[in-house]
Image (cartoon, rainbow, N blue to C red):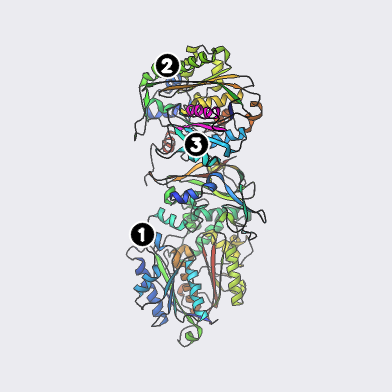
Amino acid sequence: MLGIVGYGAYIPRFRIKVEEIAKVWGADAPSLKKGLMLEEKSVPAPDQDTITMAVEASKNALRRARINPAEIGAVYVGSESHPYAVKPSGTVLAEALGATPVVHTADLEFACKAGTEGMYIALSLVKAGEIKYGLAVGADTSQGAPGDALEYSAAAGAAAYLFGKENVVAEILETYSYTTDTPDFWRREYQLYPEHGGRFTGEPAYIKHVIGAAKGIMHKAGMKPADFKYVIFHQPNGKFPFRAGECLGFEKKQIEPGWLVNKLGNTYSGSSPLGLTATLDISAPGDVILIVSYGSGAGSDGFIFKVTERINEVRDLAPKTRYLLEKNRQYLEYGVYAKFRQKIKKAT
Amino acid sequence: MPTPSRNWREIPQRYRLEAGKCVGCASISFPPRIVCPQCGSREFETVKLSDRGKILTYTIIRVPPHQFVDQAPYAVAIVELDDGVKLTGQVVDCNFEELSIGKRVAIEFRKIMQEGEAGILCYGYKFVPE
Amino acid sequence: MRDVAVIGIGMTKWGELWEKSLRTIFTETALLAIDDAGVDHIDSMVIGCMSSGLFTGQEHLASLLADYLGHGPVPAVRVESACSSGGAALRQGFIEVASGVSDVVLVGGVEKMTDVSGHEATYALGTAADQEYEGFHGITFPGLYALMAAAHMHKYGTTREQLALVAVKNHHNGSFNPLAQYPFEVSVNAVLNSVLVADPLRILDCSPITDGAAAVILCPVEMAKKMNKPLVKIIGSGQATDTIALSSRQDITWLESTYLAAKKAYAMADKKPQDINFFEVHDCFTIAEIMVMEALGIVEKGQGGKAVQQGLTALEGKYPVNPSGGLKAKGHPVGATGVAQAVEVVKQLRGDAGKRQLKGARLGMTQNMGGTGGSTVCHIFEGR
C-alpha cells in the first residue's frame, strides 16, 4: 500500500481583517467580504518565511509518521515565495529535520500548486522503489500588492506530507495532472508583487483546469462526485471552491471541512494541502477524499486518497489544522501588517 | 556579523539542537564541547535537547545592535529546558505583558537575522508560549 | 616577589572627545602619569583596550602608543579582557614589577568609542558575550544585565528604586569629580522616568559611551621610597574567570568571578572585606554594583539593594563605593576603566581627592569586571 504516512500543518498566529485593509484604501469592506467570501487572513511574523513554516509543518508530519528522519529519501518544498532566489529552501528543511546528507532535494515553483507538485513527485519516487519515504511541503508567505484585490487574500501557511509504503494513513488511489500555458497570474523577476488578468483568472484559468483535472481523475478512477466523502479544491477566495464544486456536482457538505479560506486567506502553495490536512483531521477510516489544486500559469494536480484505520492512531499526535487556525490569534492594524510584510521598512 | 561559514558550522545546534552528553557524568553541554566543564572528561555522545521549558528571566531589548535594528523591540529570555539545559533566545508570538518568570515555552524554528538585503539568512531556535 | 608601588597617575577629562583621536587621548594621559612620577624612562608598557579594532579599525595598538609616547622602543603589549581590560593590564604590570622583570612599568587603559554609531557601539560591546549563543540572538549588554536584574529582583526582592539609588549616589559623588563625563546630580525620579533600554533597565541605569584614558606608573617599593612621594602600595591582586555565557552560570544572580578574584586579593593582602575603607567597583549598570557588593563580601547575598538604600555605601557611609562617581557618572571608556579605578584609589590614599576626599582612607580596593562577570580583576591598595 502506498500513501501518506504522516501529515502536518502550520499556520502563523497573526491575522488582519478585510475591514482593516479596506479602511486604508477606502474600499467597500462589506462588498469585498461578500464577493470574496472572506473575513480575514493570516499574516507571517517578520521572523517567519516559507522555510520556517515548512520546518514546523514537517515536524508535525514527523510527529504523526514517527519515522527516523534519516530515512527520508527526498525533500521537496513548493512555494512562490522561497526566501532565496538562488539557494534552496529544501536543503534548510532537510538539515533541520536530520534528513541530510543522503537525500534528494529540490525547490518547486508553479504559483499555488507547487505544493501538490512536490506531493506527486515524492509519492512517485516511493512508488518506483527509489526511496523509502518522501516529504513534500507546500508553503507560502505571498505578497498582495497594496490596494490590489489580492491583498485581501494573500496569506501564509504550510502543509507537509510524508509518503511511504508502511503504516499508511491515507492510501493513494489515483493521480492526474492537467496543464496548459494560460497566463492568468504571473510575477516577473525583480518585481515585488505579481500581476494578474482580472476576470481572466476565472473561467479560462481556475475553472477550466480544476474542472479538467477533476473530471479527468474521476474518469480515470471510474468514480463520480457521490463516491467521495470529501473534496478539496484550491481556495484563492471563498467563492471559487464552491463554484467548482457546483460545476462538477459536489455538495457543500463535502467541501466545508476542508474550506479554510474564509478565516485563513489564500495560502497559495499551502492552500489545498492545508485543506487536505484539515480534512484528514476529521476523517474516518474508509473515507475517500478528492483533492484538486490549482496553480496559475496554469495547471491542476488531482489526487484521490482513501483513509485507513491508522488515522485514529495518528491524528492527535500533532496540532490539528483548525486548532492552529483558531488558537492564540492576534489581530493587526494595517501599519503593523505593512511593517511585518516589509511593505514599509525602518530607515537604518 | 555571521559569515556563511560561521553560521553553517553551528547548524547542528541551531537547527537540530544537538548537544553533547558527557559519558562520564551525564551532564549536557550546549553547544557541545571538547572538555566537560563538570568532570573534565573528553568523551561525549550526541543528544538532542528537549523542545520545551520555562522562562528563568527575561528582558525586552529596546536599543538593539545594528543587525537587529528592524526587529526591536523584542523579548529575550534565558529558558531552562525540561532536560535542565539553559538557553538564551528570543521569545516571540507573545505580548510583552504576558511574559513572566516561570512561563512555559516551546521551541520553534524561526529566522534569527539576515545580513542586509543581499546577505545570508540565519535560522535557529526561538521560544513561543507553549 | 617584590613589593609594588604606584608612583604616578594620570587622567584627563572624559566624555565625547570629538577633537581627539585615540592616540592623542592616550598620549596626553600617559604623559601626565610620567610627569607625576617624575621618571625619565619606562621599562615596559601594558595597555588595556577592549576593541580599538572594532571602534577605530586599529590593531597593533601597544606599538602605536609606544611609538607616540616618544620614550624610545619600549616593550609594549595590549591586554584584552572585555571591560576588565584595564584591570587585567594593571595586573600584568603588577606581575612584571613584582617578579623583578621590570622596574618602571606604565600601565594604561584607553578606549575611543564615539567614532562609530550607537548601534555599532552596542554591537562592539556585545562581543564580550558569547557570539554564537547570546549575541546571535540579538542580546545586548544592557539586555544581559537586565536579565540578571530581573532574576535578582525576583529572587531577593531588590526594587527598581534601589537600582535607581545606585545611579543617584554615583552621580552625587561624580558631581565632585571635575574629570567625570557627567559631573552632575540626578534624582530618583529622573532615573525611573528615563527611557527604557532593556526592561527593567533604563538609560540612567546604564554607564555611558565615553572616550578617555587613564594611566599609572608602577615601580618596586624600594625605588618609590627614594622618590619623596606619598607611598601607595599594591598589596593584593586577584583574577578569576567564569562562564562566558550568562545562561551557563550556576546562579545568574551571583558574580562568582568577583567573589573568587576578591578572595585571592584579600588572601594576598591578608585582609578581610571589612578591613577595606572604600571601593571602586564596576557599576556598568546599577544592578552590577549591587551584585558586586554582595560578591565582595561587604553585604550578605541578596542584600545589596537594601544596603544602598540604607546609605552603607555613600561617601559618608561605612563602606563608600565609587567615590569617583563610578562608571555611571565618570564614564566608561571600556579599556580605561580598570586603570581609572586605580587612579581614584591612589588619589584618595594620597589625600588628593578634593571635595570627595574620604577621611582616614588607608585601604582601597578596585574591582573591574568583564562581560556579565566572565572575568574579574581585583586589587587592594594601601596608603601610609
- Work out whether mark 2 precedes mark 3 in sequence or the reverse, and give the earlier one: 3
Is residue C263 inside the magenta stretch?
no
Furthest-front residue in this view: A129
Q: What is the spatial separation of the Cα atoms under label 2 and label 1, in whole angstroms?
A: 64 Å
Picture quadrant of residue A340: top left
Q: Chain of mark 3?
A: A
Say which of marks 2 and 3 sits in front: 3
Where residue C91 appears, as percent x and y from the top left, is: 51, 73
The foreground one among C287 and C80 is C80
Q: Chain of mark 1?
A: C
Mark 1 Cα-neighbour bin, 10 Å: few <14, some 14–19, many ≥20: some
Furthest-right residue in this view: B25
The foreground one among A33 and A185 is A185
Say which of marks 2 and 1 sits in front: 2
For residue C115, the mark is 1
Q: Is residue A216 visible?
A: yes
Q: Which residue is mark 3?
A: A104
Where residue A195 appears, as percent x and y from the top left, is: 35, 27
The boundaries of the magenta stretch are: A115-141
Furthest-bottom residue in this view: C226
Q: Which residue is mark 2?
A: A208
The foreground one among A224 and C176 is A224
Picture quadrant of residue B100: top right
Is residue A132 inside the magenta stretch?
yes
Residue at figure coordinates x 38%, y 41% from the top left? A345
